[in-house]
Amino acid sequence: DTEVTQTPKHLVMGMTNKKSLKCEQHMGHRAMYWYKQKAKKPPELMFVYSYEKLSINESVPSRFSPECPNSSLLNLHLHALQPEDSALYLCASSQDNRVSDTQYFGPGTRLTVL
Amino acid sequence: GENVEQHPSTLSVQEGDSAVIKCTYSDSASNYFPWYKQELGKRPQLIIDIRSNVGEKKDQRIAVTLNKTAKHFSLHITETQPEDSAVYFCAASLFTYNNNDMRFGAGTRLTVKP
């Protein structure tokens, strides 16, 4: 399996909802990432997990809460989001920090906050 | 932190012509420079990358050059085809253990006219 998968593909939520985005890879990669991409903009790094430990948090608001249950899974828990949080949320993974940091992206979850 | 600038923001070429996209970076310690292609509604796909110990890398119609002294790198696409039309992002990161902080340029929208 050479892909990063993400669910759901689309998500519409109200500002009071709680939802989760899921990301999975079975390439044996030990680093996983969350990016946020607004329309016509580049991906912006949110979080990095390395060997299931949070290694980078780019000052993301606490309404976004990442979780890495194991080396293959990455979740992003969402709570009390704002309409400006509407964006494409991309997950990525890379093999191993000491070997290669080539990042492979999932197809993304398109999030709309009403 | 790293800052990546990318030019031009839009580029239109005739099929068969060459296209060149340029990026500069600010952190002289950065040592990994990937290029991603993103078609509308799809994930960023790695098309080529280069590490700081190499000055040039080629893969069929795509080549990347790196000038570490000047801190800039460029993507060259020869014999362009309509299917090359997409947004291209350059990125730069420092490849060390537990540091996967990759920063993207703003992107170049390439249009190849048949």
Image: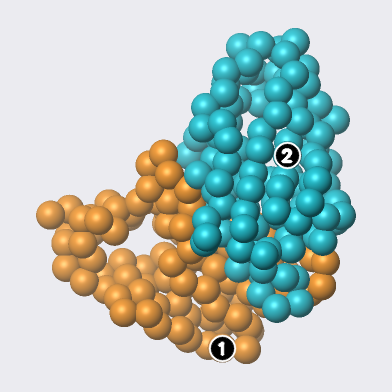
Q: Position of residue B22 (x, y in %)?
A: 47, 67
Front-lying residue, A82 or B4: A82
Front: mark 2 or 1 = 2
Residue at image position (61%, 63%) is A27
The three-letter amino acid code for the residue at tag 1 is: Val
The three-letter amino acid code for the residue at tag 2 is: Asn
Judged from the image, the secondary structure of the residue bearing numbered disc 1 is loop
In this rendering, the answer to whether A87 lies above or below B87 is: above
Colour chosen for chain B? orange
Residue B65 is marked as none
Colour chosen for chain A? cyan
Q: Residue furthest left?
A: B114
| Cα–Cα span, label 2 and label 1 | 36 Å
Residue at image position (71%, 48%) is A73
Q: Which residue is mark 2?
A: A75
Q: Position of residue B3 (x, y in %)?
A: 68, 59
Q: Is residue B76 left or right of residue B65?
A: left
Q: Position of residue A8 (x, y in %)?
A: 56, 31
Q: Which residue is mark 1?
A: B54
Location of the N terminus of chain B by quadrant is bottom right
Q: Is residue B89 visible?
A: no
Location of the C terminus of chain B by quadrant is bottom left
Residue at image position (56%, 52%) is A4
Q: Is residue B93 left or right of residue A9?
A: right
